[in-house]
Image: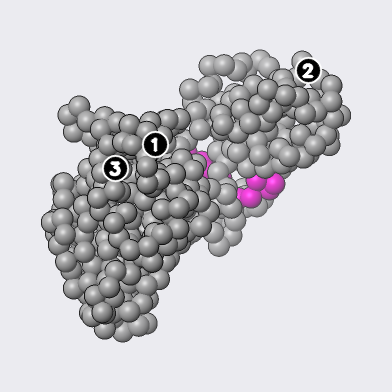
Amino acid sequence: MKVEQIYTGCLAQGAYYIESDGEAAIIDPLRETAPYLAKAKSNGTTIKYIFETHFHADFVSGHLDLAEKTGAKIVYGPEAETGYTKHLAKDGEVFKLGKVTITALHTPGHTPESTTYLLKDEAGEPYAIFSGDTLFIGDVGRPDLAQKKGHLTAEDLAGWLFDSLRNKIMPLPDHVLVYPAHGAGSACGKSMSKETWDTLGNQKQTNYALRADMTKPEFIEAVTDGLLPPPTYFSANAKLNKMGYESIDTVMARGAQALSPDEFEKIANETQALLLDVRDKTVFVKGFIPNSIFIGLQGSFAPWVGALIPDLKQPILLITEEGKEEEAVKRLARVGYDNVVGHLVGGFDAWTTAGKEVDSIETIDADTFATRYTEDLNLLDVRKPGEFAAAHVKTAQSFPLDFINEEMSKVSVNNQYYLQCGSGYRSTIAASILRARGFDNLINVQDKFNDIAAGPIPTVTAACTLGKS
C-alpha cells in the first residue's frame, strides 16, 4: 500500500494518491490531470476511483477530466446531486482497491454531502481518514459555505458537524492518520494548523472542536463565531464542481494564444478584457500597462483572483514573465477562470519596445515612510480586519483588500493615499485596482508591517500604544 499527499501551497490544498496491487485512487484532485496520470503510468497502476469528499468551493476539482481520461469511477457521498454520471456511495459502503479497502463515512456538516473516507490496510485495520473539510488539523470546516436547500442554516449544519465528528470520526482508533483537504491559509476554516496531517489521537487532545466534554450548543457557537463572508467565487466554484465544466485541455489551448503588443492592445480594446499582470510586485510598480491589475504568481494568486474578480467568465489578457504563461493559465483555471484569451508575447519588455504607453506607482520602504509620516497623512491598511485589530498604525484607516469593492465609497479620487499591508503584496494589488479606477495620487509602502511598527510611528495594538508619538 502506498499513500501520498500531493500538497499545493498556493491553495493550501491536499490531494491524495492511494495505490495497492496495481490499482490507484485519487482523492480531491486538482483540475490539471497530468500529475496523476504521470504518477499512475510511472508506477504501472490503473486509476480505479476518484473520491470527492464534497463539492469544493475554493477550487475546481479535476474529477471530470480525470474520469474522462482514465475511465475511473467518480464517487461522492450521500446527498450529492450532480449534472454528470457518478457513483453515489451509501454510508458505510466499502470500495476494494487492490488489497486494501476504502469505506465511505457520511459526515455532513461542512456541507450536506460531506463524506470522510476511511482507508484500511491489507490486514483490515484502520490506517487513515481522508476528512476533506470535515476535520482539519486544529480546526473543522466552516458550516456556512454549502449550497443550501430550503431553510437550512449555518447553525443547522454546525449541529450536523458536531454529530458527525462524535459519531463517525472520534470513535476511530487514536493511531489513525488524519489527512484533510486543506491547511493554514485556506478560507474553508478559521484557524487551521500549518501542519498538513496528524494522528487522530493528537487531534482529540489539541483540536478545540474535538474536546470530549464539549456540548453541542458550545460547539455550534464556537464554529459559527467570527466567520467572515466567504470569497465571492466560492459559490460559483461549488456550482462548477456540481454541474460540470469545460475541459482543462481546451482552457489551456485557448490561453496559450501569444499576442504581439498591437494584437494585445486591439483585443483589449475590442473585448473589454481584464489586463492581469502576474509578475513580481517589485517589478510591477516600476512599470506596467495602464489599467492593468496586479496579482502576482509569487503570492496567494488563485485565492486573490477569486476574491477580486467577480465574474468567472471575464475575458482575461495576461502579462507574465517569460515562461510563466502556462502556469498562470493553469492556476487561473484551478479556481474557474477559464476565459484567458491570450498573453503578451515577450512580456512587458515587448510592450515598452513597441513604444506603448506605460504607468508606474511610487513605492517606498518603511524607513522612507517614517520620514514622511504625519497624523494628517491618509494611510489605507489593506490587511484583514483581524490583522488590523491586532496592531495598526494609530491613524490608519482599515481598508481590507478582501472587500475593496465595498470599501471604495470610503475614499476619494481627489486625495493622496499611502497603502500598506503585511509585506507589500496586498498593498500592490490594492494600489493597482485604485489606479485603474482613477486614483492617481498613490504611494505604496512595499515593506513588512513589522518593519513599519518597529519605527517611530505611533502603532496601536489592542488597547495600548506601542510606538512613540
Question: Alpha carbon of mark 2 to alpha carbon of mark 3: how far?
Answer: 48 Å
Residue 394 screen position, x and y as percent: 73, 22
Question: Alpha carbon of mark 1 to alpha carbon of mark 2: how far?
Answer: 39 Å
Which quadrant holds residue 40?
bottom left
Q: How is the image coloured?
A: one colour
Question: Of label 1 and label 2, which has the lower sequence position?
Answer: 1
Identity of the residue furthest to the front in this view: 213
Q: Is residue 189 left or right of residue 358?
A: left
Residue at the spot 38% in from the left edge and 55% down from the top edge: 181
User: Which residue lies under the disc numbered 3?
Assistant: 161
Which residue type carries mark 1? Val
Q: Which residues are magenta?
A: 271-284
Q: Is residue 19 left or right of residue 225?
A: left
The reply to whether callout 1 and callout 3 are in contact (CB within 8 Å) is: yes
Q: Is residue 406 above or below residue 114?
A: above
Camera-side residue: 115 or 279? Answer: 115
Residue at the spot 39% in from the left edge and 36% down from the top edge: 223
Camera-side residue: 316 or 173? Answer: 173
User: Which residue lies under the disc numbered 2?
Assistant: 375
Which residue type carries mark 3? Leu
Which quadrant holds residue 162?
top left
